[in-house]
């Protein structure tokens, strides 16, 4: 693990810039999420000021409300800041859950092989063919009636779409690593299956998890917003969610009112870009094969004079 | 070892046969996800609105008071006959929904796909061919942005732009009410119906309504296609046969076109099958953004009505479409790539 | 295989005019550490109908030299010196003119035939494309006639003309690649380890085909290989390459029977044959070509190394028997380097080398 960190620290060139910019953007959102109560001027579901006076509906940006208010009397600036907390909570929960379920499943399936592997691969492939959003919709729909429409329900809906991804990557890496000579050598000297799995395969496979994890996190932010936009996500009084706010902004946009739509959307774009950049930067760092070396130009040195007598 | 049609038809047959177990796994998944649950579809849809007796009657009429395994087998039997059940909330066959609203989704996705291919292929090829040039960097940034920006937000921003710049341009729906009223529904695809009616204003009205949604969805897809084409062109340019072609003095243009690009396209076609799923997801969101009367809008409507049978039917239909397109893509692949047939 | 050796002295096959001439040719690669001197000052000439074998360890610059002659180099590499094809220096031509010479004047046969044909194009399409590139007005019938002609020579039945590459075996694909190169009748062809990826029986067949080329087409062939047996069988002359330089070049029989350079000698000793009783190898590995050792590049591994070898680069000289070699030890043995003082001729102390390496 320390080797990994050092590797990241020692990144050079473009990969370093990508990683740096991505990290900065992501960290800003993490700060928003952590310190939302202090950064946001109001609560996410607050519609009256301290004196009990109701906010103006669709107030334009500026006086009193930095980014204006929306059609539900919410302060947009506060909703955007609080939305970071919701997004990161859901994303963290869903990525951790899918890693915890998907990685061991892929390891075991790839290592054992046989019919267990074949059945699992077939089922996962079938799930994989379903449009990811449709799958999330089904799960959100189903979970709505069981555990409501809070952060946990949203995270679980996302878990369903990411497990097959981890399963696939981990299983394929395991299968190819299992055939690798060093694993064969370990088996030849009599290492037990669990030792091989823990010491040789896990370390190998785990390399790819940070990259997929960050890229999935980026994807999850978009999917969560999509669910919210379709009215299947987190309800506005439970937490602030950017996608839901965008669905509220639809009619205002048709009327030419821009501020309720602009800011939550911009927040989504920035967070996804930040996470994607981190993922791509990690990818470039951890898979040196992808890296393109900078070539130094060839300059011929003058020839040494030698007399051929 | 013959390239005869025998091996190709065998390949196609095997590919089609594989659809059946795939579909079965999907159907089972959908059925049990939506149905094995505490509570039941009827109380979900009408709970609180009807008396307990009235709910029982509806349950009996729908047959959902029978054992689950019976319902499951019946569901499989129905799907085998292309019957996707009837909605609970308004008692319509799901197939009628597909007929009435499928056309809107079809013209939206086809228009978007067309746009994406016309824009994405040349740009992706350019970026891959002149890797790391300024053009490549700009094209790649465009690709990243189409990925990072949620399609519905892009749609809303475009609406705002159009509302400001061209206030008379339509930004919602598939046609003006007057057009819908005058055009005779024959094919249930509004664009075709308008064309068949021969009414110039109706045709231009429907076409105008298509521009913004198709463009929005097309932007998303073109980003995907650009990324795919670029990577595959770069890959193909490194191919040994490309170097060998250069060694025979084949011009650089011909090397890129006949050797690198053609091989890249085969790889792209293979993965484009997977993009059908992304297109469908994008279509659902685009429809909601532009109030487009397609299947995605219907799905959202029945989800909000908590109509399990309608959702189950529509999802089954979507899954069928995805599986069938992926098979079609594989078959097309078999036709253009001689190696696949083995 | 003795009949092949006999053919070599056949006066009908005597070498003709000079086709290709390299003078102090350098081919350097760009890397992130600076230029790799993969080919560093190489001179030789190649006559019509002649086969020159090029041998050496992996990483000594053989393939780079072969590609450098054709102009098929990776991005960031550069050529310098003189490279004359029938008198014109190709390095002074515009890139477009150089490109046009490929295929028509300069042919290339690659190491791995399996991936060298476009999988989506029929064999006939490969031939049509190649011929049309160099002769826009060529007719369809002419394309077919010329392609089938050369395919027949390669032993590919005309019925397979419209097949796809994947329908052929490895050996057949290499013959297809040769046919595709020869259909344009290039006067000069580079064959870069054409049999490495193939099995032994196919190897003999391909070598036979290449050997027959000069009788059929009067082609000048540069045959790159690390298999000395192939050189002995098929080549007129042989050039031995080490660390980007040709250290010895001469008549194949002369070089093999009386090697002048210690590297050639050691290379021959490490060849396995039926008479081999023990395995020989050359200690160490070829040097890093970003910073080659000073003096003679071979001196750190050379059993005959002298003091002068570590400081002064040897000069290429002609020795008795007609071979040319660059080696101080060989020079002294044959009494060619009179100007080097006696003190420089003391054997090189190995400890000095390691000290010099650390400095």
Image (cartoon, coloured by chain):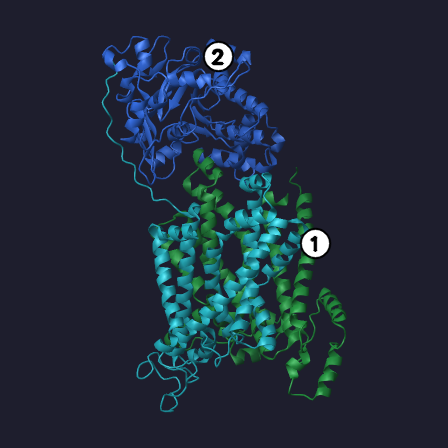
Instruction: Identify which residue is drawn at 39% across, 46% down.
Output: A292
3D distance between C-alphas at marks 2 and 1: 62 Å
Q: Quadrant of residue C26?
A: top left
Which residue carries the number 1 mark? B17
Chain letter for the part of the structure drawn in cyan: A
Q: Would residue B251 be found to the left or right of residue B177 on screen?
A: left
In this rendering, the answer to whether C166 lies above or below C20 is: below
Q: Would residue B29 be found to the left or right of residue C24 on screen?
A: right
Chain letter for the part of the structure drawn in green: B
Subunit ID for the residue under disc 2: C
Q: Nearer the viewer, residue C263 or C318?
A: C263
Residue C55: x and y in percent read: 43, 22
Q: Nearer the viewer, residue A174 or C245?
A: A174
Instruction: Identify which residue is drawn at 42% across, 60% down.
Output: A276
Q: Quadrant of residue C38?
A: top left
Instruction: Identify which residue is drawn at 35% across, 14% down.
Output: C324
In this rendering, the answer to whether C284 lies above or below B119 is: above
Chain C, colour shown: blue
Q: Which mark is residue A286?
A: none
Which residue carries the number 2 mark? C8
User: For the residue labelled by badge 2, is the local secondary structure a helix, a strand or a loop?
Assistant: helix
Viewport quadrant of the C terminus of chain A: top left
Q: Quadrant of residue B110?
A: bottom right
Q: Nearer the viewer, residue B28 or C63?
A: B28
Residue B166 appears in view: no
Residue A243: x and y in percent read: 47, 73
């Amino acid at each position: 693990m320390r080797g990994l960190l050092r590797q990241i620290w020692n990144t050079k060139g473009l990969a370093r810039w990508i990683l740096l910019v991505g990290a900065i953007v992501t960290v800003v959102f993490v700060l928003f999420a952590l310190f939302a109560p202090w950064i946001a001027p109001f609560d996410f579901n607050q519609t009256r000021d301290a004196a009990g006076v109701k906010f103006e509906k669709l107030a334009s940006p500026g006086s009193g409300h930095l980014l204006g208010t929306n059609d539900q009397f919410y302060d947009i600036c506060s909703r955007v800041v609080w939305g970071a907390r919701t997004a990161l909570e859901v994303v963290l929960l869903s990525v951790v859950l899918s890693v915890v379920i998907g990685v061991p499943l892929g390891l075991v399936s790839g290592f054992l092989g046989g019919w267990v592997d074949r059945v699992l691969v077939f089922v996962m492939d079938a799930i994989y063919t379903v449009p990811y959003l449709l799958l999330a919709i089904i799960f959100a729909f189903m979970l709505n009636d069981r555990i409501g429409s809070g952060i946990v329900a949203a995270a679980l809906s996302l878990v369903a779409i990411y497990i097959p991804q981890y399963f696939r990557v981990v299983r394929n890496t395991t299968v190819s690593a299992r055939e690798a000579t060093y694993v064969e050598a370990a088996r030849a000297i009599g290492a037990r299956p669990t030792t091989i799995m823990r010491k040789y395969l896990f370390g190998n496979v785990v390399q790819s998890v940070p990259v997929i994890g960050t890229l999935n996190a980026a994807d999850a932010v978009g999917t969560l917003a999509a669910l919210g936009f379709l009215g299947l996500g987190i309800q506005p009084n439970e937490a602030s969610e950017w996608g839901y706010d965008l669905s509220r902004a639809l009619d205002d946009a048709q009327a030419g009112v821009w501020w309720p739509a602009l800011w939550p959307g911009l927040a989504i774009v920035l967070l996804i870009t930040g996470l994607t950049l981190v993922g791509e930067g990690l990818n470039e760092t951890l898979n040196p094969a992808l890296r393109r070396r900078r070539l130094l130009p060839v300059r011929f040195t003058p020839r040494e004079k030698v007399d051929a007598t | 070892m013959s390239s005869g049609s025998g091996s190709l038809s065998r390949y196609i047959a095997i590919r089609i046969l594989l659809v059946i177990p795939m579909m079965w796994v999907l159907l089972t998944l959908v059925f049990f996800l939506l149905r094995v649950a505490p509570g039941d579809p009827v109380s979900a849809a009408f709970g609180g609105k009807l008396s307990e007796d009235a709910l029982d009657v509806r349950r009996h009429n729908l047959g959902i008071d029978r054992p689950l395994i019976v319902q499951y087998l019946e569901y499989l039997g129905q799907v085998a006959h292309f019957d996707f059940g009837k909605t609970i909330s308004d008692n319509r066959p799901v197939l009628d929904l597909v007929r009435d609203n499928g056309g809107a989704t079809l013209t939206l996705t086809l228009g978007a796909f067309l746009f994406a291919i016309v824009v994405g292929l040349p740009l992706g090829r350019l970026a891959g061919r002149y890797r790391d040039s300024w053009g490549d960097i700009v094209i790649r940034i465009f690709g990243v942005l189409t990925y990072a920006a949620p399609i519905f937000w892009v749609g809303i921003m475009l609406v705002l732009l159009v509302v400001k710049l061209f206030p008379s341009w339509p930004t919602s729906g598939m046609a003006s009410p007057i057009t819908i009223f005058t055009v005779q529904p024959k094919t249930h695809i509004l664009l075709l119906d308008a064309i068949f009616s021969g009414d110039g204003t109706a045709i231009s009205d429907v076409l105008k309504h298509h521009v913004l949604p198709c463009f929005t969805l097309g932007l998303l897809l073109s980003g995907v296609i650009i990324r795919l084409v670029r990577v595959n062109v770069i890959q193909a340019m490194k191919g040994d046969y490309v170097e060998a072609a250069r060694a025979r003095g084949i011009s650089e243009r011909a090397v890129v076109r006949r050797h690198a690009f053609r091989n890249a396209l085969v790889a792209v076609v293979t993965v484009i099958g997977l993009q059908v799923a992304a297109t469908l997801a994008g279509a659902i969101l685009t429809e909601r953004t532009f109030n487009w009367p397609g299947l995605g809008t219907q799905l959202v409507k029945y989800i909000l009505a908590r109509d399990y049978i309608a959702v189950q039917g529509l999802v089954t239909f979507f899954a069928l479409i995805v599986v069938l397109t992926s098979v079609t893509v594989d078959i097309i692949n078999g036709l253009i790539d001689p190696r696949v047939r083995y | 295989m003795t009949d092949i050796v006999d053919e070599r002295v056949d006066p009908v096959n005597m070498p003709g005019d000079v086709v290709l001439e390299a003078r102090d040719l350098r081919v350097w690669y760009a890397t992130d550490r600076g230029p790799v001197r993969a080919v560093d000052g190489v001179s030789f000439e190649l006559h019509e109908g002649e086969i020159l074998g090029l041998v050496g360890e992996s990483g000594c610059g053989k393939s780079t030299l072969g590609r450098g002659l054709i102009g098929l180099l990776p991005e960031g590499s550069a050529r310098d010196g003189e490279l004359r094809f029938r008198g014109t220096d190709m390095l002074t031509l515009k890139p477009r003119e150089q490109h046009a010479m490929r295929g028509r004047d300069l042919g290339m046969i690659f190491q791995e035939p399996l991936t060298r044909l476009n999988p989506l194009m029929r064999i006939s399409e490969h031939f049509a494309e190649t011929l049309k590139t160099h002769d826009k007005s060529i007719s369809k019938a002419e394309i077919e006639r010329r392609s089938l002609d050369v395919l027949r020579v390669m032993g590919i039945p005309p019925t397979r003309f419209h097949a796809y590459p994947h329908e052929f075996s490895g050996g057949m694909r290499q013959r297809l690649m040769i046919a595709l190169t020869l259909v344009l009748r290039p006067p000069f062809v580079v064959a870069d380890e054409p049999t490495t990826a193939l099995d032994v029986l196919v190897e003999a067949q391909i070598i036979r085909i290449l050997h027959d080329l000069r009788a059929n087409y009067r082609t000048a062939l540069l045959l790159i290989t690390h298999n000395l047996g192939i050189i002995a069988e098929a080549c007129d002359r042989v050039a031995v390459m080490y660390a980007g330089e040709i250290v010895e070049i001469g008549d194949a029989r002369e070089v093999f029977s009386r090697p002048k350079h210690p590297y050639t000698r050691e290379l021959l000793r490490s060849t396995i044959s039926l008479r081999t009783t023990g395995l020989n190898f050359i200690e160490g590995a070829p040097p890093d070509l970003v910073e080659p050792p000073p003096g003679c590049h071979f001196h750190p591994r050379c059993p005959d190394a002298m003091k002068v070898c570590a400081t002064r680069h040897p000069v290429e000289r002609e020795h008795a028997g007609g071979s040319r070699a660059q080696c101080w030890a060989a020079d002294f043995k044959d009494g060619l380097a009179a100007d080097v003082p006696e003190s420089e001729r003391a054997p090189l102390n190995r400890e000095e080398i390691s000290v010099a390496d650390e400095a």
